[in-house]
């Protein structure tokens, strides 16, 4: 069920019986010469909507702009500062609680959002407001991702390329896959940006001139479909697990 397509009386019926919501979050940021800026939010939205369709749980609108200052040097990248993002996510999550939601899955497809979503989830749980957890599609199927690609990326690599080839093929510049590989770097280690144990870079532009990593020619829509099916299955199971828990069991353990 997609919240924005429903009327308020029909939503009343949902909140009377159910208390789970899926919130898709991504970014609007550069993904190399071959993928659209929408890459992360398209992926997050597809997973959240499909899991909601299969289970009947509620899906909210997608948060399209995330924490992406590390991609700012590339044309068009949009971002909000981390504290603003955390406040915003916390605020609309509290709104859901007001309607009766007490467990939320942040269906996230942008690495830069992870630590902030975890922080918001911690705050809300510490207050016993609700239980919110972060889910990242590729983390749910690590073995499959490793098997499908020699160098999976991460950013703008074949893993994300395959997802967009499957979900929105009209937005992929397939004639630029070789350029993407040649102009980028194979992996973060190749850029030698860790010095004596310290990570010395802040921005994608510090280690890659076209913004991406990995071998994009390794991507196919078929691989995208395979990952989409497998990770959606994981997300469906996560929804069902979350729904089956007693609320008090999801709350913090009391002080010893
Ligand atoms: Zn991405």
Image (cartoon, grey):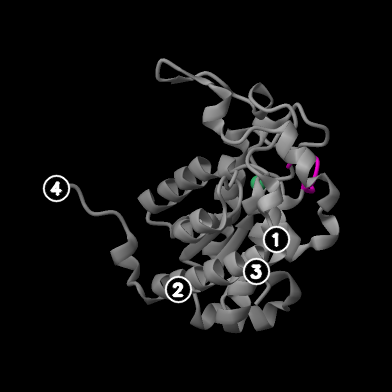
Sequence-wise, the earlier of marks 3 and 1 is: 1
Q: Earlier in the sequence, mark 4 or mark 2?
A: 2
Q: Secondary structure at mark 2?
A: helix
Stretch in magenta: 31-37
Mark 1 surroundings within 10 Å by alpha-carbon count, few (fewer than 14), some (14 through 19), many (20 or more): some
Q: Which of marks 3 and 2 precedes in the sequence?
A: 3
Please tell me whether mark 4 or mark 2 is closer to you in this view.
2
Q: Residue at x 56, y 76 (%)?
A: 57
The residue wearing badge 3 is 225
Residue that extends furthest to the left in the rendered view of this protein: 256
Quarter of the image with the N terminus in it: bottom right
Taking the image as shown, residue 174 lies to the left or right of residue 125, namely right
- Helix, strand or loop under label 1: loop
Q: Is 230 left, or right, of 30 in this rendering? A: left
Front-most of residues 123 and 72 = 72
Location of mark 4 (residue): 256
Q: Nearer the viewer, residue 179 or 19?
A: 179
Q: Are marks 3 and 1 in contact (CB under 8 Å)?
A: no
Residue lying at 51% horizontally and 47% vertically, measured from the top left: 117
Figure label count: 4
Mark 2 neighbour density, 10 Å: few (under 14) some (14–19) many (20 or more): some
Q: Is residue 194 left or right of residue 81?
A: left
Q: Which residue is mark 2?
A: 237
Residue 241 location, x and y as percent?
39, 73
């Amino acid at each position: 069920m997609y919240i924005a397509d429903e009327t308020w009386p029909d939503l009343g019926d949902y909140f009377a019986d159910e208390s789970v919501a899926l919130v898709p979050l991504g970014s609007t940021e550069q993904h190399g010469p071959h993928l659209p800026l929408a890459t992360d939010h398209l992926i997050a939205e597809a997973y959240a909507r499909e899991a909601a369709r299969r289970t009947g749980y509620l899906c909210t609108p997608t948060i399209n702009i995330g924490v992406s200052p590390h991609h700012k040097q590339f044309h068009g990248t949009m971002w909000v500062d981390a504290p603003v993002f955390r406040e915003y996510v916390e605020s609309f999550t509290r709104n859901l609680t007001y309607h009766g939601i007490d467990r939320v899955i942040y269906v996230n497809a942008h690495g830069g959002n992870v630590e902030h979503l975890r922080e918001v989830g911690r705050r809300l749980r510490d207050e016993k407001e609700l239980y919110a957890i972060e889910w990242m599609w590729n983390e749910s199927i690590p073995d499959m991702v490793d098997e499908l690609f020699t160098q999976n990326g991460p950013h703008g690599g074949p893993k994300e390329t395959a997802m967009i080839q499957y979900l929105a093929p009209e937005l992929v510049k397939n004639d630029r896959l070789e350029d993407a590989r040649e102009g980028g770097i194979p992996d973060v280690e190749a850029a030698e940006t860790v010095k004596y144990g310290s990570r010395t870079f802040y921005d994608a532009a510090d280690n890659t001139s076209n913004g991406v990593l990995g071998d994009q020619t390794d991507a196919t829509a078929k691989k995208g479909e395979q990952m989409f099916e497998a990770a959606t299955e994981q997300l469906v199971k996560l929804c069902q697990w979350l729904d089956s828990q007693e609320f008090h069991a999801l709350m913090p353990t009391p002080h010893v």
